[in-house]
Amino acid sequence: MTGRRLAVRKTYKLFIGGAFPRSESGRTLELEGYNVARASRKDAREAVVAARKAFGGWSAATAYNRGQVLYRLAETMETRAGAFAAACTGRREVARAIDRVVWYAGWADKLAQVLGSANPVAGPYFNFTIPEPTGVVAIVAPTEPALDGLVARLAPAVVGGNAVVVLASDDHPLAAIELAEAVATSDVPGGVVNVLTGLRSELAPVLAAHMDVNAIDVTGADGDVAALEVLAAENVKRVVRAREDRSPWEIASFMELKTVWHPIGR
Amino acid sequence: MGAVEKSRKDVLPAGSWDYASSLEGRDIVSFEERYGLFIGGEQVSPRSRSWFTTVSPSTEEPLAEVAQAGAKDVALAVGAAQEAFAPWSSWRPAERAKVLFRIARILQERARELAVAESLDGGKPIKESRDVDLPLAAAHFFYYAGWADKLEYAFPGRRPRPIGVAAQIVPWNFPLLMLAWKIAPALACGNTVVLKPAETTPLTALLFADVCRQAEVPPGVVNIVTGDGSTGAHLVRSEGIGKVAFTGSTEVGKAIQRELAGRDISLTLELGGKAANIVFEDCALDQAVEGIVNGIYFNQGHVCCAGSRLLVQESIHDQLVRKLKRRMSTLRVGDPLDKNTDVGAINSKAQLDRITELVQAGTDEGAELYQPPCRLPEKGWWFAPTVFTNVAQSHRIAQEEIFGPVLSVLTFRTPDEAVEKANNTMYGLSAGIWTEKGSRILWMADRLRAGVVWGNTFNRFDPASPFGGYKESGFGREGGRHGLEAYLRFE
């Protein structure tokens, strides 16, 4: 007996439908000192199913509610700042990521006013355009920075009402799973955010080709982006890339626009 | 389909009246025998040395010979557009606006000529080209003209810049109007364009080249290359383009998206549709019937947002179908230049074959066909207004875009079921809702996965109103402030 206490290590698993399963394949990868789950193609498909199931409720939530839920996520991230710092480049990155979530949370109930419009058509019709989420979004997270890079893509997609399937950084997957734990303890409904760790070269094509994925963010795709784009064309997926660091237009790139007409009359 | 062979006189009761024809004069338009390509402000013979004939679908008469642009021709056009880009994009925006205003005015001044040309080359009723295509095309230029010197107000927090050369491919259903949808915002934002009109309807685009001359559009700012699908493929593959805008079939749209993979080219796609027109039992029934007819028989059903799936609440199905059939029997099918004509010619033999094949599939799969008695002209390509009842969601006629005057009727009981069925398609371009209950319109509009939702109306268009699809109906919007985004990059 030495008297030394051994740390209780965390098992880094996947995050699908609000639960933390191991990969159905039973495979892991040794990364950053842990045996991280190596998601299979089937896990990826399960994650899409979970996201689709969650999309209806999340997209129908009021904008005020979505804003509060995202703000709540910032709160749960703040209390885990230490764990996050250990999984990324440090406290400054964590602060940036949390502030980014707060910034995007505030956009939830302003989007329609900035991105939408009332349209002055030449006739007796009331006509307006509103932004709506595109649906299930696959996000290939940037390799670095592991936390803020992911948050910069995740937050604009989720605040608009989309459900997402994230492919975490190949080399630094721990930050994504820490984030999943913050998501799980916030009020984000299960399935709105799903996180897969593993080999993106194996998983990204599955999501790019998936017929029930509406958009794919290839910002972090370091391999053959053109090949992903070819697969994405099969169901006319929206292929999204980061253009600006923080912007409502980043949210807009995950949104559709719906225009509604109605006659005016007595 | 025997009924369609009977003449109107045979089926109308004795002593009933018929319309006297009221033909729009075609002298107002004179086509040249041959049209070269419009490149760098001049009409040039194609390097391909290849030509094809464009015919009138209502009579099969040849109208003119048109150049078939090959790879070299497309490269020349893109080169001319590239050369023109730097000077054009540095024009003072207010002056650029004036060019667009001029185009709008000239389209108004030459509206009758262009409308007749459109009906001759495309087969659509003069009533529609005169009252819809031309006024909307002019309005589109007028609308975007005003944006040219106000772009910095359109996107808060962003600095808009033109992209460069826009490659634009338009379909044959609204040839000049789709040209306007493409060219007006592109020029307003300071881009130059190479536009490819559809193979079967090149003439109004070639007349538009003359409009450009009159408006003193600088050479190379607008280039028009005619040809078949291979010309479009050359255009999309061109080096030197910065943007592709395509309106057409989902199949070709996907091919273009694949083709552009890995290239930093902005893309917008306006593709097919299979819109649900949803009719509730509490609707104003006669208005709904008008909306249904307008939704599917407007422009022979050659409309990507056509209301081709009629979802009727079960309780009013029989009554509505009865009224619909009666209304269909008053539709006048025939000479596009007759001002009485409601339904013109099918745009091409190929399209007629596709419609015929799908209608046959409808019958084979067990749906019940109805066509009102009407006499179709001997020459040209025609299809009688058609409605199918007893249609199941799995039928091809309920799933595939027919792009013809063919309506499929399905039923529902609850609003939830209507939403479920309406959204049960890979498309998501448009939808219609008919009910007198305001809250239900908004409830439905909220849940329909479609880019344009018409409540108690259908097939309305306006330059100020963004148009475009969800899902496999494409991405990007045309019209309105949102339509500018496709033609800008941001610093």
Image (cartoon, coloured by chain):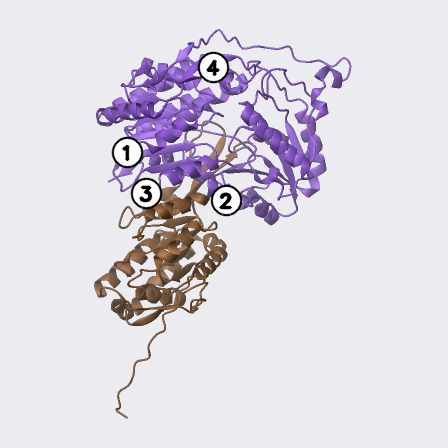
Chain colours: A brown, B purple
Q: Secondary structure at mark 2?
A: loop
Answer with left or right where residue A49 lies relative to residue B289.
left
The residue most toward the right is B14
Q: Is residue B232 above or below residue B490?
A: above
Give the Cα distance between marks 2 and 1.
30 Å
What residue type is disc 4 on? Ala
Which residue position holds label 4? B117
Which residue position holds label 2? B449
Give the Cα distance between marks 1 and 3.
18 Å
Q: Earlier in the sequence, mark 3 or mark 4?
A: 4
Decide which of A203, B415 is in the foreground and name it: A203
Answer with left or right where residue B297 lies relative to residue A129.
right
Label 3: few (<14), some (14–19) or many (≥20) C-alpha neighbours in 10 Å: some
Q: Nearer the viewer, mark 3 or mark 2?
A: 3
Q: Name the quadrant of the C terminus of chain B.
A: top left
Instruction: Tell me the number on the disc at residue B262.
Output: 3
Q: Chain of mark 3?
A: B
